Amino acid sequence: MTRPEDSGAAAFQISVAPSGRSFQSQGDETILAAAIRSGVGLPYGCKDGACGSCKCKKLSGSVAHANHQAKALSADEEAAGFVLTCCARPLSDVVLESRQVTDESAYPIKKMPVRVSTLEKKSHDVMQVRLQLPAADTFRYHAGQYIEFILRDGARRAYSMANAPHTQTTAAGVELHIRHLPGGKFTDHVFGAMKEKEILRVEGPFGSFFLREDSDKPIVLLASGTGFAPIKALLAHMQFKGITRPTTLYWGGRRPHDLYMHQWVVELATQMPQLRYVPVVSDALPEDQWTGRTGFVHQAVLDDFADLSGHQVYACGAPIVVESARTAYTAQRGLPAEEFFADSFTSEADKHGPQA
């Protein structure tokens, strides 16, 4: 096998079955970086070897993996031919299998300055941040995608847009929901010194988490915590486009206040008769006077659906929730693996767990 250092700046052909899409890698870029540059929409999330969203089956060819989390790709999975495209560099021409290929060329990824327009606390640890975009710059994205803040030291932090794309036509800006992680370099700033009119740099859009509008299957939306942000964008987009597919939203939090826009969803459900809303709380206290569903949010779906074989599931939030849902729904409820779409919210701490 060719060693990584022998590959030099060779260009390799990457082909994706069964779609037939193909693109070339350049130099030492990862398969995912080459796909994004080429406008080929492979599935992905964190771009950092932590979430596993980009995992694909390698049908032929050789790759070298950079450091990644064992939970994202185990040694057994790698031995079985699976790859993480976000940290796999091709050492030859490669053929992958992925059924979630989309054409992303319509939405160019761009870097731009943004101005903080409003800061509003939605709960004790969730800040709704609205960013004003350059007036002369058109920013297009899919509901469910995310942007990355580029910090002064070059570090990046990713947050999903919570407003639907059509809102750009009336006011160029994005809404983000940022949870405070005490000790976190960026979120400490958001909840501390950040002020309106502050200028930041962002890049985007990124991510393969968005509604597949070519399907008419009923939808299960699963959100934990601020995983609600991209789900909110999906719902607003569905309402705007007049999409009437039967949809059930399960939103989970530890305490009722973690469902920080509960009333917004309740009101939306009165306008969208096809939408059923199931809030789920895992650790309610007596003083919360919670009378709704309790337990783990992914389990609530299992309790309600004996068969998911004809559904699509969109799951977003804590990695443990996303992975528990993926495993259970495919193994126990017949959900086709290619109909599970996810955005796993990995923190910096998550990205520095056990390496494979």
Image (cartoon, rainbow, N blue to C red):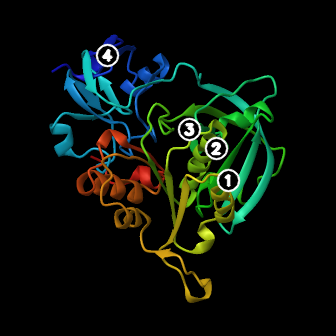
Task: Give the residue displayed 56% in from the left and 38% down from the top.
Answer: 145
Query: Picture coordinates of residue 314 (x, y %)?
Result: 45, 47
Task: Give the residue displayed 39% in from the left and 27% down from the top.
Answer: 101
Pointer 1 residue:
271
Identify the element where label 3 is drawn.
loop
Q: Which mark is nearer the camera, 3 or 2?
A: 2
Q: Residues within 10 Å of mark 1 (few under 14, many from 20)?
A: few
Q: What is the three-letter code of the residue carrying label 2?
A: Gln
Q: What is the three-letter code of the residue carrying label 1?
A: Gln
Task: Tell me, for residue 239, which label it has, or none.
Answer: 2
Horizontal side of residue 24 vs 207, given as left or right: left
Mark-to-mark CA distance, 2 and 4: 33 Å
Residue 296 in view here: yes
Q: Nearer the viewer, residue 218 or 192?
A: 218
Mark closer to the chain start, 4 or 3: 4
Pointer 4 residue:
20
Q: Are marks 1 and 2 in contact (CB under 8 Å)?
A: yes
- Quadrant holding the N terminus: top left
